[in-house]
Amino acid sequence: MFVYGHGGIGKTFLWTTILSYLRSIGKVVLVVAASGITSLLLPSGTTTHSRFKIPIDMTNKKSCDIKKRAMLGDLMCHTSLIIWDEAPISDIRCFEYLDRSLRDVLECKKKPFGGISVLLGDDFRQTLPVVPKSTRYELTTLTLPKSYLRPLFEVRMLTENMHLLSNTNAETYTISTMDFASWLLNIGDGLLGCPDTDDPDNTSWVQIPESLLIPPGPNALQDLIQFVYGDCILTNPTAKDLLERAIVCPTNEVADKINNMILKTITASGLVYNNTNSM
């Protein structure tokens, strides 16, 4: 099954619900993601390459390094479900190599993935496989819809924007918030933007509405920090509040600058934890 939707919070909630239920009845469920950062956000998550021993260089390989009588092979024999997040960013060969390997390890040649149920998820509006200096055609040929496995998946759509529904603050749940969500979807569907004169088939220029921008000026970064965190969190920060907010930075230098500005704003006392390594 492929779960397709744009609500990250809803998708994560779905994974957690399925995982909790199946594990409560004694089933083995593996949760993986294409990137390391996303895998850290998933319950007991790991990267696909780490969990299934998918080769980094897939040029001369045809399967994963899963051996029948090894620990990983034994784990596959007891696995009921694989939840694979960020599926569109994974190279098509990752799915096909795992399919071949599980058919061999589980000695079930006629069933995809050796009979293990596989639940994929994410949104094809987001990042596709990253291949340096490749053309649009080369990228699309590496995506899941081009695989022989695609007809075997049943598609389910997430239609509720959980980012909006999870916002319990009535004051912030405004028309502008809903418009922003629709604006993002229209960009992903290619409904907005003016084609670039040099590369009209692959590149478009999108005008960001003024209402979504913080006006430039000497206090722009401070205004951004205030908008994201607010006085309440900066005065009395908690782990829960900080986990729900973030400022995306283009470079490490900018991240360090914003972090230093935030730390100077926080009035609460800090704690220092020392770490030591010993043999």
Image (cartoon, grey):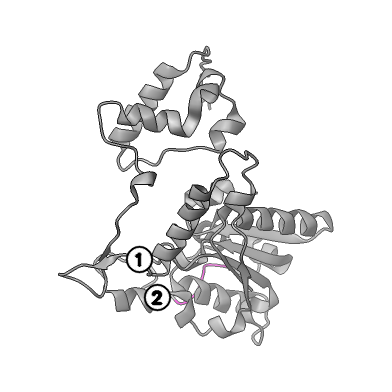
Q: Nearer the viewer, residue 64 or 163?
A: 163
Name the front one of labels 2 and 1.
1
Residue drawn at point x = 39 percent, y = 66 percent: 129
10 Å crowding of disc 2: few (<14), some (14-19), many (20+): many
Residue drawn at point x = 59 percent, y = 68 percent: 120
Query: For residue 212, what is the image quadrant?
Result: top left
Q: Residue 263 location in percent, x, y? A: 42, 20
Residue of label 1: 192
Inter-mark Cα distance, 2 to 1:
26 Å
* In this rendering, position of residue 155 left or right of residue 91: right
Q: Is residue 2 magenta?
A: no
Q: Are marks 2 and 1 in contact (CB under 8 Å)?
A: no
Could you say whether the residue bearing mark 1 is in a helix, strand or loop? loop
* In this rendering, position of residue 49 left or right of residue 153: left
Please state which amino acid type lies under the numbered disc 1: Leu
- Magenta extent: 62-66
Please state which amino acid type lies under the numbered disc 2: Leu
Residue of label 2: 142
Could you say whether the residue bearing mark 2 is in a helix, strand or loop? loop
